[in-house]
């Protein structure tokens, strides 16, 4: 039997790179302690923010 998990590993790598990029971006924007905490959360769930912004832009 063949186990084809290569595509899932590639998707995880892309998500990981995106997460580090989002952390880098949001970390630079933060000024206070709670903004740094929020930057960590945003780095983890960045795809949800991206999809929300795309749908917001399409709605206008």
Image (cartoon, rainbow, N blue to C red):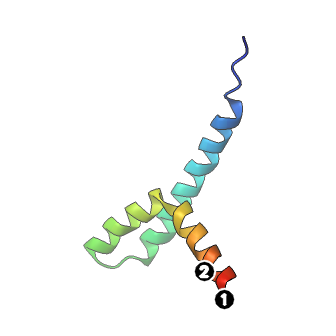
> Residue at the location (58% across, 56% down)?
18
Front residue of this view, candidates 56 and 6: 56
Quadrant of the frame with the C terminus: bottom right
43 relative to 29, above or below: above
> Residue at the location (39% across, 61% down)?
40
What label sits on residue 60 in the rendered view? 1
Front residue of this view, candidates 50 and 39: 50
**What secondary structure is marked by label 2?**
helix
Front residue of this view, candidates 31 and 2: 2
The answer to whether the residues at label 2 and label 1 have Cβ atoms under 8 Å apart is yes
Q: Which quadrant would residue 47 be assigned to in this image?
A: bottom right
17 relative to 7, above or below: below
Provide the residue designation for mark 2. Answer: 56
Front residue of this view, candidates 19 and 50: 50
21 relative position to 34: left or right? right
The picture places residue 7, in percent across and down from the top left corner, at 71, 36
Quadrant of the frame with the N terminus: top right
**What secondary structure is marked by label 1?**
loop
The picture places residue 27, in percent across and down from the top left corner, at 42, 69
How busy is the neighbourhood of tag 1: few (under 14 within 10 Å), some, or many (20 plus)?
A: few
> Residue at the location (56% across, 72% down)?
52
> Residue at the location (59% across, 42% down)?
12
Q: Which quadrant would residue 56 be assigned to in this image?
A: bottom right
50 relative position to 42: left or right? right
8 relative position to 43: left or right? right
């Amino acid at each position: 039997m063949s186990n084809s998990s290569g595509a899932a590993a590639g998707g995880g790598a892309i998500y990981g790179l995106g997460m580090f990029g989002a952390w880098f971006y949001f970390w630079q924007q933060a000024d206070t302690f709670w903004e740094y905490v929020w930057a960590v959360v945003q780095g983890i769930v960045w795809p949800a923010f991206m999809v929300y912004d795309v749908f917001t832009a399409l709605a206008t």
